[in-house]
Amino acid sequence: MKKILIIAPVLLFLFSSCRKDLSSLNVDVKQAVTAPSYSLFSNGQRNLADYMTSTNVNRNIFRLITQQWTEVTYVDESQYDLGTRTIPDFWWRGLYKLVLVNLEAARKLIPTDVTDANQQKNELAMLDITEVYTYYVLVNTFGDVPYTEALDPDNLFPKYDDAKTIYYDLLERLDADIAALSPSDASFDGSADLFYAGDVVKWQKFANSLKLRMGITIADFDDAKAKSTIEAAAPNAFTSNDDNLVFKYQATTPNTNPVWVDVIQSGRNDFFAASTIINLLNDRNDPRRPGFFGTVPTTTTYLGGVPGKGNTFNLFSPPSDAITAPDAPSILMSYAEVEFILAEAVERGYNVGGTAESHYNNAVTASILQWGGTTTDATAYLAQPSVAYATAAGTYKQKIGIQKYLALYNDGFDAWVEQRRLDYPVLVEPFQAQSPYPVRFSYPINEENLNSSSYSAASSAIGGDKVDTKLFWDKF
C-alpha cells in the first residue's frame, strides 16, 4: 500500500504573474498546489477505516458499548458515559470532515483528472458507494443528520434531514452505483483504491452486500422494502471470505493499525475482555477464542471482567496478538455477515434460496475460517447442541443474533447495530451505569451550540436528543 499524504481538501490556486511579481518568490515549488482526485479518495478510505477500527475512547467506543471489551481503570465509556470526552463530537467530525469532505472533493476533480468517460463512471460509483457506507454509519449512530446541505462549504448551519428519507435515498444511490459499475472498463489503480485495488467485480459484490446489510436493518420497520432490497442484492453479494472488505495496514508507521497504536505503541493496558462475550465463547468451547483474546497470563484460562467495573489487567484475557499486531487487517464487511443476513431472510420468507440452517452454517464456518480455524473446527462446533441451528436455544433472532454477535467481534459498530436490531445477546447492565443502554448517540455539543436551530428541530423530530431514543428502524 502506498503512503497516503493527508491533504486538506481545499484547493489552492496560483495567480498568473509577470516577471516583476515578487510574490512568486513565496511559492513553494516542492508542494502540490492541488490535490489529485485519487489521493483524496484514498484519504477518505483510510480515514473511514481508521475511525471504524480505532479503539481510541475519544473516537470509537463500540467494543465497550457492546461488551466485547471493558476497561481497566478509566471506566466511563464502559459505563455508557458518552459525554465526558464529547465522544459524539469526535465521531461526527471525523466522518464528516475527514471522510465525506475528502470524498466530495475527489468527486469534483475526477471529471478533470480522468479523460475516459467509462473510467470516470467506475471511479465515481466507487466513491459514491463509500459515501453511502459513511452516511449509513452516521444515520445509524444519530438518526436525523445533515445530508442534503451537509457538504456545502457556504452553508454553516445545515438542516438535518429525516433519517428514513436519507436511508431510502442511500438505497437508490446504491442501485445507481451498481448499475454504473463496468468490469470491462478501467478504474482507480491498485495503489489509489485501498479497499479493492481497483477491482470492479469486487466493488460490485461489496455494493450488493452493503445493500443486503441496509435491507435487513429495516426489516422490522418496512418488510416489503427489505424483501425487495434483499432479493435483488442476494445473487450478487459476497460468496467467500476472499470477497471481504479488508483494509490492509502495514507493519511500519504511519500506516499501522489503530488498535496497535492505541493498545501496544501507547504502552497502556486499558482494555480486556468483557465477561459478556467470554461467557458466550466459553459456554460453547468456541474455537475462535485464541483469535479473539489471549489467556489470563500464566494460565490457559479465558476470563472476562464485569463491564464497567475496573480491575487488574493481568487477571483477565487481553485482546489477542492477531488484532493488536501493527499490520493486523481491518475487516469492514465479511462473507459471514452476508450469510447471516441470508439466514434471517429465509426465516422472514424472502426468496434468496437455501435454508436458514444452511446459510447459518455457512456463516459460522466462514467466521471460524476468517479467524484462523479449520473446517474441522467448524464442523465440531456446529455439532454442539448449543450451536446447531436445530437445537440452539430461542427464536431465529436469538440463534442468529448470538452467532452474528460473535462473528462481528472487533467490529464494534456493526455489532452495535445488530444488537439493537435483534436484541441478542442480552447485555448486562454495566457496573454503576451512567445512562441507559445507548441505542443512539446524542448530538454533538458543538451542533447544539453553533447550529442550534437545526439541532433543536432535529431533536424534536426524533423524540428527544437522548441516548435511549430509538432510531426509526428499531421497533422492538
Image (spheres, rainbow, N blue to C red):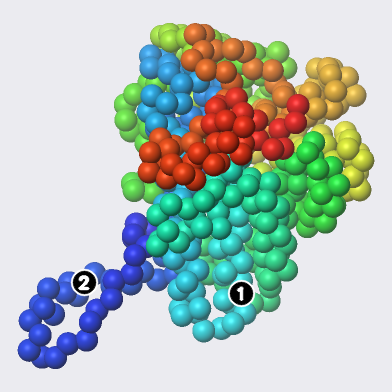
Above or below, 3 against 309 in this view is below
- Amino acid type for the residue under numbered disc 2: Lys
Where is residue 47 shown, x and y percent of the image? 44, 50
- Which quarter of the figure is the C terminus placed in? top right
State the residue position of label 1: 121
Q: Secondary structure at mark 1?
A: helix
Where is residue 350 shown, x and y percent of the image? 90, 45
**Few, some or many residues within 10 Å of mark 1 (<14, 14–19, 20+):** many
Q: Which of the two residues, 17 or 235, is positioned nearer the viewer here?
A: 17
Kindly indicate whether the residue at mark 1 contacts the one at mark 2 (C-beta within 8 angstroms): no
Where is residue 121 shown, x and y percent of the image? 61, 74
Q: Residue at left 69%, top 38%?
A: 472
- Which quarter of the figure is the N terminus placed in? bottom left
Is residue 300 at least partly visible in the picture? no
Q: Residue at left 47%, top 47%?
A: 95
Q: Secondary structure at mark 2?
A: loop
Is residue 268 at least partly visible in the picture? yes
Q: CA distance from mark 2 to mark 1?
A: 32 Å
Q: Earlier in the sequence, mark 2 or mark 1?
A: 2
Q: Residue at left 40%, top 62%?
A: 154
State left or right for residue 32 relative to residue 328: left
The image quarter containing residue 262 is top left
The image quarter containing residue 463 is top right
Q: Residue at left 71%, top 52%?
A: 168
State left or right for residue 63 relative to residue 152: right
State the residue position of label 2: 30
- Amino acid type for the residue under numbered disc 1: Lys
**Few, some or many residues within 10 Å of mark 2 (<14, 14–19, 20+):** few
